[in-house]
Amino acid sequence: MYGAQSKRDLALEFQSQIPILRPSIHARRANLTVKFQDLYGFTVEGNVDDVNVLNEVREKVRKQGRVWWALEANKGANWYLEPSISEGIALKSSLKFSTLANAITLKRLIRNGIPPLLRPKVWFSLSGAAKKKSTVPESYYNDLTKAVEGKVTPATRQIDHDLPRTFPGHPWLDTPEGHAALRRVLVGYSFRDSDVGYCQGLNYVAALLLLVMKTEEDAFWMLAVLLENVLVNDCYTNNLSGCHVEQRVFKDLLAKKCPRIATHLEALDFDVSLVATEWFLCLFSKSLPSETALRVWDVLFYEGAKVLFHVALAFFKMKEDELLLTHHVGDVINILQKTTHHLFDPDDLLTVAFDKIGSMTTNTISKQRKKQEPAVMAELDQRLRRLNSLKLDDK
């Protein structure tokens, strides 16, 4: 939700036009750093080469949009909701060829990017958010926000603390109206799921959802389906056990998919969680340009949490040669941060993530998680025992 209705209309009109960025002649000649706004209102800094990349990307978005609109016209507005083929399920002889063709077409189309104007409805349908919303009374979200209004909990206090720190300077998010909308979504969800409550990182995820979805309520349901169905359990609970499991799985995958890098980083005593924790908790919303992050989310909402591993591994793969020359942990972090912040072409990232990293099934990753869970829970239990012991010593 991009501010009031009039602001949303302007934003959608802006997105549909997908303007060409035109740096000044002086900036082009000197290759100076220029500032500009992306499609979702974020201020981006880059040189003229970056601007050229963004213009090329926007031209591809326009072409991709024409493909989607043609399918809408030929197959119907909700053609992508026809039955698809689930991963790991054998193809039945009764399955129509048209269904198979739609499934293959849809996967390819989504990896190529959902047009900004269609993104809200496609996400809402394919992610399961629409189905989840349909299981409760129509007034659920409004009733929830009214019921929790004025209530104070540790979660609401942390949310209030984090609101002004969530994408500061954004023309809508960093306003009283933006803060109020983000607060309602986060506070509402903290009461819906008391096990999660609120975890730092969700503020960035929910903020980006507000910018994409047509309404505040739709953003709430997208957050719900993300936490309850798309991502692994316990990623955002108090002890972050799910997140710790994901970090261990990622470390194993890095050793398998990028063995030279993994060996080099181990020699440097580099812990991948130094960078990957934020990636997984914020779903790349803080590290990637918004237009690239949303291309990742396009695939995430359709193919599931395995996409996070594909993308995180791609960062290392793209900079393998540079990373192998590093001698300090700080150099590794700097290379990865610079890389992610300037990944203005989503196709560069996603090509590496899926073509060069290779296949990873959801089933394989689930087995890896189950393998790592006992060690993580034992480590967290030991940490809790030490903490309780220290508290007793202080008394």
Image (cartoon, rainbow, N blue to C red):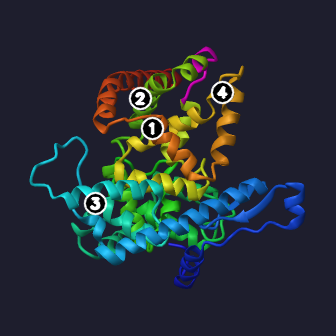
Residue at left offset 56%, top offset 85% = 6
- The three-letter code of the residue at mark 4 reads Asp
Q: Count residues near mark 4 (Cα–Cα under 10 Å), then give few for <14, some for 14-19, many for 20+.
A: few
Judged by depth in the image, the label closer to the viewer, 1 or 2, is 1
Examine the rendered structure and indicate whether residue 80 appears above or below residue 313: below
Circle 1 or circle 3, nearest the eye:
3
Q: Secondary structure at mark 3?
A: helix
Q: Tell me how far mark 2 sits from mark 4, CA to CA.
A: 24 Å
Q: Earlier in the sequence, mark 1 or mark 2?
A: 2
Which residues, given as a range, are shown in magenta?
265-272
Mark identifier at residue 80? none
Q: Which residue is mark 2?
A: 249
Residue 269 is covered by the magenta coloring = yes
- Residue 216: in magenta span: no
Residue wearing tag 1: 309
Q: Is residue 69 left or right of residue 34?
A: left
Q: In the rendered structure, which amino acid carries the disc numbered 3?
A: Asn
What residue is disc 3 on?
102
Question: Who's the residue at 49% across and 65% down the image?
Answer: 64
First along the sequence among labels 1 and 3: 3
| Mark before the other along the chain sequence, 4 or 1 | 1
Residue 295 on image: x %, y %: 50, 56
Q: Quadrant of residue 278?
A: top right
CB under 8 Å between callouts 1 and 2?
Answer: yes
